[in-house]
Amino acid sequence: MEDLSGRIVKHPNVKFLILELLNGTASFLFRVLSSLNGKGIEEVKGNLRETIEGYLCAQKNLAGFHLSERKTLKDFLDDERTLESTMAYLLKTFSSRYGDAFPLIVIALWISLERKEEQFEEFVRSAEEPLSLNEALYAFWVFG
């Protein structure tokens, strides 16, 4: 999992995923997280957005940017180190919040970063017998 976590942090689509999380449009990932923690999708969206915005605001302040500047959080995401540190922070947050389900979240993140959500959905639909989310994520990772 460590190797995969490192690849996630440096993935070329990290910025797009973080922006989708901030905009509330990462529906696949929201559904997975909601399913794993039993909270509603809207609550998951809000919590995740708060987490990311809080981290980025802290990073902005540490980097010497003042909140009065016109730079938005999205503009701040143009820096590659900020993207990597934000994704690393999210991984640590997921690890502490989801415990044993963390490997499933890492797989779901990878699916989202690789833009394979539709392939995953098709994989689940084509299964000979119904799969739980856990089984589906692991099976897709191994066979997909």
Image (cartoon, grey):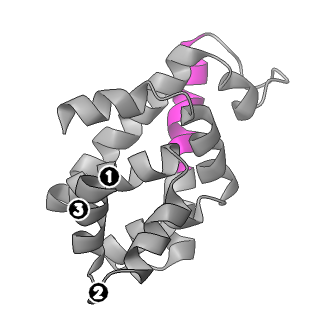
Residue 56 colored in magenta in the image: yes
- Pick the quarter of the image with the N terminus: top left
Which residues are the magenta region?
50-63
C-alpha span from label 3 to label 1: 8 Å
C-alpha span from label 2 to label 3: 16 Å
Amino acid on which the number 2 mark rests in the picture: Glu
| Residue 130: image location, x then y, percent | 29, 89
Q: Do the residues labelled 3 and 1 touch (CB within 8 Å)?
A: yes
Which residue position is annotated with label 1? 107
| 98 to 124, vertically: above or below | above
What residue appears at the point 77 percent right and 31 percent down from the top-left corner? 72
| Residue 43: image location, x then y, percent | 51, 72
Element type at mark 2: loop
Label 2 vs label 3, nearer the camera: 2
Total labels drawn = 3
In this rendering, would 40 be left or right of 78?
left
> Is residue 122 something one can see in this rendering?
yes
**Of all residues shown, which one is farthest toward the left?**
100
**Is 73 in front, or is 103?**
103
Which residue position is annotated with label 3? 138
In this rendering, would 136 be left or right of 108?
left
| 104 to 84, vertically: above or below | below
> Is residue 44 something one can see in this rendering?
no
Amino acid on which the number 1 mark rests in the picture: Ile
Among numbered discs 3 and 1, the one appearing first in the sequence? 1
Which residue position is annotated with label 2? 128
- Pick the quarter of the image with the C terminus: bottom left
Among numbered discs 2 and 3, the one appearing first in the sequence? 2
**Is 49 in front, or is 6?**
6
Q: Is the magenta stretch mostly helix, strand or loop?
A: helix
